[in-house]
Amino acid sequence: MGPDGRLEFDADHDPAAAVRLQQLGSRDPSLRTEARGFWRAANTPQGPVCVRVRSSGVKIVAESWGEGTQWALDRVPAVCGASDEPWSDRVQPAWLDALVQRHANLRLGRALRLPDLLWCVILQQRVRGAQAVDNWVALIRKVSRLAPGPRGLWLPPTGEALRSLRLADYAALGIDAKRARTLRECALHVMKLDRVAQGSLEEARGFLPKLRGIGKWTTGLMLACGLGDPDAVQLGDYHLPNEVVFAFTGRRRGTDEEMLTLLEPYRGHRHRVVRLVTSFGPRRPRGGPRLTPTAL
């Protein structure tokens, strides 16, 4: 089955790296990454869509299936990080400067559709990653359907589908009442989220925390992964302060406040620095207490 639309543009960066943090584990039914490319299913205002994006090293080629083809193809360059400016400033310390220069080609991408990513992020609130993956897969199989195209991806849930589920339905999927209420509340604001995605980062920074159940952790992740904000900092994460503090100081434990102090010299690119540190920086030794899920 041939695609319904195709787009090609000059770019030498890896589109898979631009969207990798949007994927909820290797079992994510709506997003699959591959060598220098990815497949993404989405609900667009024009209808369902599945997009395949590949890089030849000098060009990025996107093919799309479904009613939302043109809507999606118009946004593929931004999804791949084409609107993100390269950063190769000389910085200190030397190990970080080496990472910046070595990975100057890294681009920060945006979500194809912001609400689709928000549902996935909400399910990651205050639970272990494996549980969030299980919840995401179960939710999609419960209320969604296969995306168009040959890959066999599933569409993320629509706002209407999330609103149709009762708390008991969510509980049967392993999703606690707090996350379920947040999903149902945010599902009321799909159109607003679409408008925010087309607006400024400043507007998004002001709007997201106003949604019931959306705090600093979710806001930071949505700004960074959903809107490509190079300066977003994810606060309230169990592991992130430890990773950043270890990379800069060698200490195995850290706080949000210490992390912010260490990142202050890079204001404007703090998320980019965090991405470099967590993806390519010094590895903190594992061990010590594991996260105990909080009762919600």
Image (cartoon, grey):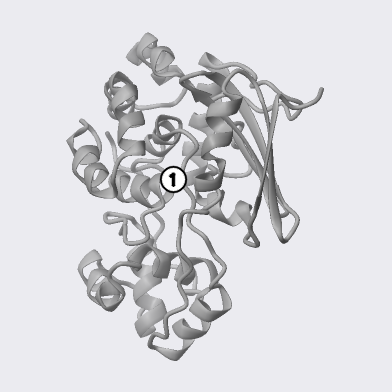
**Can the viewer see residue 66?**
yes
- Position of 179 with respect to 19 (left or right) is left
Q: Residues within 10 Å of mark 1 (few under 14, many from 20)?
A: some
- Position of 119 with respect to 264 (left or right) is right
Amino acid type indicated by mark 1: Arg
Relative height, residue 287 to residue 119 (above, below): below
The image quadrant of residue 120 is top left
At x 57%, y 22%, the residue is 68
- In front here: 258 or 146? 146
Percent position of residue 106, x then y: 54, 65
Say what secondary structure mark 1 lies in.
loop
At x 36%, y 69%, the residue is 242
- Position of 231 with respect to 212 (left or right) is right
The image quadrant of residue 215 is top left
| Residue placed furthest toward the right | 1
- In front here: 163 or 89? 89
At x 30%, y 40%, the residue is 199
Relative height, residue 201 to residue 138 (above, below): below
Percent position of residue 162, x then y: 40, 17
Residue on which disc 1 sits: 128
The C terminus lies in which quarter of the figure?
Answer: top left
Percent position of residue 14, x then y: 63, 58
The image quadrant of residue 39 is top right
Percent position of residue 174, x then y: 44, 26
- In front here: 4 or 127? 4
**Can the viewer see residue 282?**
no
